[in-house]
Image: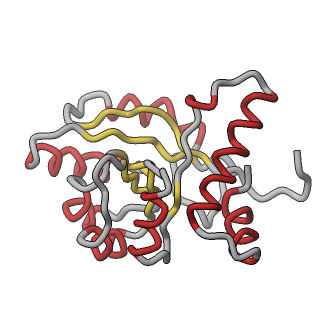
Amino acid sequence: LRGRSYMRQNRLNNLSIAQSVEQILDNIAKNCALCGRDASDVQLMAVTKTVEAQRVNEAIHAGVRLLGENRAQELLAKMMIMQKDGVDIHFIGHLQTNKVRQIVDKVTMIQSLDSVALAQEIGVNAEKHDQKNELLVEVNIGSELSKSGVAPDRLSDFLGELSGFGRICVRGLMAIPPVSGTER
């Protein structure tokens, strides 16, 4: 699914957020059925970068239960207005160590762990809040200089370095492939 272009196209068609969410969920269900997958195993994440809190609330009211934000300051500004009961918020952008203390207790997952120093900072702040943080390790699979992430050939060593951190829980990997000229 191409969520951004799909939502952008719906906006051009003057669909409400609720109508867009309904169409996307229907599209997910149809595609899952085509490939023999259970639609309940697929989660829709609404990425809220540059989207005002009121529109985020509309998406929540329409059934979105997973939000993704990639800027710490923007997340903090929206937190007071967002109606986030029953909603998981993932931090999906590059996270600087000096921003960890501001968001660590406000998100259910950080999807951009890319250094031991960041893991240490998350662990220290998780300890302060008596919590355990779920993380995805960001892997720079295309070795792109413009992207953050652990190099694929360093991944095993990196995961080994994290094994001693008690307040973090690595749940998987996050990788974005380089842009390619061909569609699959």
User: What is the quadrant of residue 73 in the picture?
Assistant: bottom left
- Location of the C terminus (image quadrant): top right
**Nearer-the-camera pick, 92 or 16:** 16
User: What is the quadrant of residue 80 in the picture?
Assistant: bottom left
In the image, residue 144 above or below residue 98: above
**Nearer-the-camera pick, 29 or 47:** 29
Q: Find residue 93 and report its horizontal and vertical position in percent.
A: 46, 61
Q: Which residue is the extreme one toward the right?
A: 182
Count of picture labels: 0
- Colouring scheme applied when the structure was drawn: secondary structure
In the image, residue 57 above or below residue 125: below
User: Is 93 left, or right, of 139 in this rendering?
Assistant: left
Q: In percent of the image, x 24 and y 49: which residue is there?
A: 122
**Nearer-the-camera pick, 82 or 70:** 82
Q: Find residue 87 and report its horizontal and vertical position in percent.
A: 36, 49
Q: In percent of the image, x 27 and y 41: which residue is there?
A: 133
Q: In percent of the image, x 61 and y 70: which residue is there?
A: 16
Q: Find residue 103 and report its horizontal and vertical position in percent.
A: 26, 60
